[in-house]
Structure formats: C-alpha cells, structure tokens
Amino acid sequence: MSRVEEGIKSRFKCNKCSHSHCRTKELAMTGSGLSKFLDIQHNHFLFVSCKNCGFVEVYDPNVLEGKKGQLGSVLDLLFG
C-alpha cells in the first residue's frame, strides 16, 4: 500500500454517512488518440469507497504525492 493510500485510510470520513472505514483501489486507464490505439495506460486514479454506504471519491495520486508535469509518465512509458 502506498503512502498516499495509508494517509487517506487513516483520515477517511465519508462525506455521505460519516463512516470512518474505506477501501481503496488504483485504476489505470488509456487516454485518447495514440495511447488508446497502443493501449498505453498512463492515466492513474485512486478510487476510495466507503465500506458502509459505498460512496466513491476519485483522486489523482500524482497530485496527492506532489508530482508535477508529465516527465514521470514519459519515463514510465520508456522504462516500464
């Protein structure tokens, strides 16, 4: 589990029902154009769902980790 996921789980409070337990899943998706054609999944998102009511919030882990720009995505594509 990443540092971001641990931080979210430790501070989680559902906006709908105020429950304090959640489940997290990271999802990678293709973009549009060439990345879709080549099935390059460079869009990563963190889905956080309440274990009580199922309400889901979506976060960009790069923003939460303080990463800026596309250099990391380019390096991931080149070096896997």
Image (cartoon, rainbow, N blue to C red):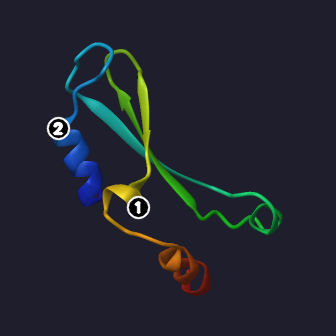
- Crowd tier of the residue under label 2, counting other residues whose Cα lies within 10 Å: few below 14, some 14–19, many 20 or above: few
Marks 1 and 2: which is nearer the front?
Answer: 1
Q: Quadrant of residue 34?
A: bottom right
Whichever of callouts 1 and 2 sits on the residue coming sooner in the sequence is 2
User: Badge 2 is on which residue?
Assistant: 11
- Mark 1: amino acid: Asn
Q: Residue furthest bottom?
A: 79
| Real-space CA distance between mark 1 and mark 2, rounded to the nearest whole angstrom | 19 Å
User: Badge 1 is on which residue?
Assistant: 62
Q: Secondary structure at mark 1?
A: helix
Judge whether 10 appears above or below 30 on screen.
above
Q: Left or right: 15 with respect to 54?
A: left
- Crowd tier of the residue under label 1, counting other residues whose Cα lies within 10 Å: few below 14, some 14–19, many 20 or above: some
Judge whether 58 appears above or below 62 on screen.
above
Q: Left or right: 46 with respect to 28?
A: left
Judge whether 50 appears above or below 37 on screen.
above
Q: Position of residue 59 (x, y in %)?
A: 42, 45
